[in-house]
Image (cartoon, helix red, strand yellow):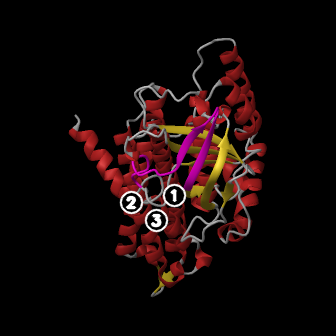
Amino acid sequence: MFEWSEEDLMVRDALRAFIDKEIRPHVDELEAGQLPPYDITRKLLQTFGVDQMAKDALEKELAAEAAGEKKESSGGGGGAMGGSMFMMVNIELAGVCLGLVASLGVSMGLTASTIRSRGTLAQKKRWLPELVTMEKVGAWAITEPDSGSDALGGMKTTVRRDGDDYILNGQKTFITNGPYADTIVVFAKLDDGSDTPIRDRKVLTFVLDKGMPGLTQGKPFKKMGMMSSPTGELFFDNVRLGKDRLLGETEDTGADARGAEGAKAGFVAERIGIAALSLGIINEAQRLSVDYAKNRKLWGQPIGDFQLIQLKLAEMEIARINVQNMLFNAIERAKAGKPLSLAEASAMKLYSSRAATDVAMEAVQLFGGNGYMAEYRVEQLARDAKSLMIYAGSNEIQVTHVAKGLLRG
């Protein structure tokens, strides 16, 4: 793949029309945290028929599984909205309201795909239908106050057996959709009373529902950017969980006792997604910068005539081409059944988030004093881009994954 298909471009143009009509007028409310993103997201899915396509795809998938057929999940939680089309949605939304994409991706992506890949048929039927249509909002809870990049090893949230049930205690933080989520996938260490150090204990995955006794969903954090994506804490105080909430309904995780493989699949998807979001920010920052360079005049001529401005625009174009080509490669690899490794996805995330941040900051500089004003939007792009260097694993931890991949050969 070396360019977007005609179908992709048709989707892009339709998305842009929807964004101009339904999202841009509400960006200030969304970015102030006054308007939760979910109704707009649902309207987006309904407008393009994605909710119904996802529902139909899921029904076929579950029927095939019930009949004993081996059927590959459509992955990503989005059902019919896979591959380049799903990338296009992320790219176009990211340049206008990055938080919308984060909320959508975590709910229909990470949350739904974890249940899809690890749940029993009964569990899939129980939670997926309302997740894949965004009728219910999902959250994926792994990060904790003292773990950060050491998500699995540093995890302190625990479950202990109590008869046929489990008792969950602990805390999660920086959870996208946490304040409003209806369905929450939670990772926790099994406290089986043994002397095994907590770092090495088995990680189990459970599904919780809003309003369960002992579950508290904190208020949205005030953040530097991405205010349109509600982020908060979750608290678990002796939450009683039946075995039907344990994904797979078994403690047997095979060789993957710490849940690393299940989490790794989520990390790979997240980090490829960051490249798509980065491209969206690069595209919008470049578009605004080119328009400004043509129309802003100094000393009687457009600033685009000045070589230093031209250098900024040229470097934006180089970043755009590089990140777009990374995405094309990832799409083709997935189609060929040769998905990116964690190290490769980390390399994509590392480069693209840096590129988006550099481009957005250069856009602010190109706009001068106007760039520092919220009215011109490039300041929002700069704040949002910075979040991509931290989100889905800080860039420092990406360096470690890339280097380890190289050293393992």
Residue segment shown in magenta:
149-171
Mark 3 / mark 1, whichever is N-terminal: 1
Give x and y (percent) for residue 142.
52, 49
| For residue 408, side relative to residue 305 (left or right) | left
Residue pointed to by mark 2: 354
Q: How many marks?
A: 3
Picture quarter with the C terminus:
top left
**In front: label 2 or label 1:** 2
For mark 2, give the secondary structure. Answer: helix
Q: In which quarter of the image is residue 356?
A: bottom left
Q: Nearer the viewer, residue 274 or 401?
A: 401
Q: Is 150 contained in the magenta span? A: yes
- The alpha-carbon separation of the residues under discs 2 and 1 comes to 14 Å
The residue lying at 47 percent from left, 81 percent from top is 368
Q: Can residue 111 be seen in this view?
A: yes
Residue pointed to by mark 1: 283
Of the residues shown, which amino acid type is indicated by label 1? Asn
